[in-house]
Amino acid sequence: MWGDGRGLAFAAAAALLATACDSRAPLPGGGEPLAASVGELRVERETIEVDLGEPRAREHLALGFGADESGPEGSFVRVEGPAAVVRLELWQPRDRVMRLRAWCPGAGARGIAVVRILLNGRQAARLRLTARPETVEVGLPRSLWRVPENLLRFEADSRAPGTPRAELDLAIDGLRFADEEAPSPADRSPAFSPEGDLELPAGAGAGFYLELPPGSWLAWREIEREGAGGELEIRVREESGRDSRSRRFEAGEGEGRLAL
């Protein structure tokens, strides 16, 4: 489940798990509270910044990066090989501007290296970088984003088709998305209230696993919101990955249910 809005985004009140054979029939009475079925909530947040060179950034480095380093430029990571990939989480696709601090150590005092940036396999930009660290802005339009995982790829620019991909001479200090606030350690995390309501702060999601019999449903009494704007999205995926579905709900909607 993913809440988007301002303030405390949503409380899905009295969430129940129930089993019914017919989707048109009313759910049987009772049901099992969702809070009693979920052992642990996995907190999920959008990726706002990645400080490469720091241990906490490792979960975002999917491919092609060397060891963490530090120097006069600060902490950074060099690319090892022809390409490198950063993994980014996003739950609400939108136009974004990425501020990237990077350089090409082997370019020399006057040399320039060209780096291609692709998001989910589609080219987003070509950067001309020198041996001096600099911060550049890259526009990443909404059409390039997916939910929830995105792959940001850096590779050496090669215009000759069929030629082997050159080694990528690139060091990255970090990246951050402009005008977006990263959560602070003091921010609230998704949790169940004592009454059993699932509370989702704005910009955060809660993931969990359930073992369910066929015909199971997730049902709720209402969706409430504190603050203006926002939506709640519920995404369901089989463990095998064969079946996936999602639905979005506006705050203030009454009772509802979703087949699991």
Image: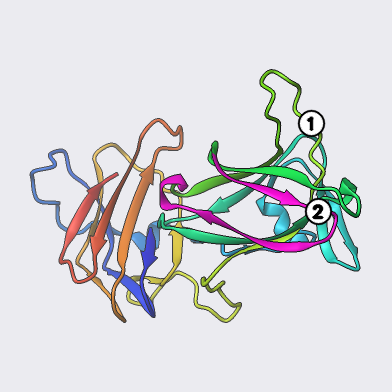
Residue 119 visible in image: yes
State the colouring used for the structure image: rainbow
In depth, the one of 194 and 85 nearer the eye is 85
Residue 43 visible in image: no
Say which element carries label 2: loop
Residue 204 lies, with reference to residue 241, above or below; the image says: below
User: Quick one: label 2, few (<14), some, or many (20+) residues within 10 Å?
Assistant: many
Q: Quadrant of residue 200?
A: bottom left
| Position of residue 14 measured from the top left corner of the image (x, y, whole percent) | 26, 67
20 left or right, relative to 100: left
In space, the residues marked 2 and 1 are separated at their CA atoms by: 17 Å
Residue name at image x 45 percent, y 32 percent: 240
Say which element carries label 1: loop
Q: Mark 2 = which residue?
A: 130
| Position of residue 181 measured from the top left corner of the image (x, y, whole percent) | 53, 74
Residue name at image x 44 percent, y 68 percent: 203
Looking at the rendered structure, the kind of residue marked 1 is: Ala
In depth, the one of 191 and 101 nearer the eye is 101
User: Quick one: label 1, few (<14), some, or many (20+) residues within 10 Å?
Assistant: few
Looking at the rendered structure, which numbered label has been put on residue 166? 1
Looking at the rendered structure, which numbered label has been put on residue 257? none
Q: Nearer the viewer, mark 2 or mark 1?
A: 2
In magenta segment, residue 125: yes
Report the magenta residues as a range: 123-145
Q: Quadrant for the C terminus, please.
A: top left
| Position of residue 119 measured from the top left corner of the image (x, y, whole percent) | 55, 44
Residue extending furthest toward the top = 162
Looking at the rendered structure, the kind of residue marked 2 is: Thr
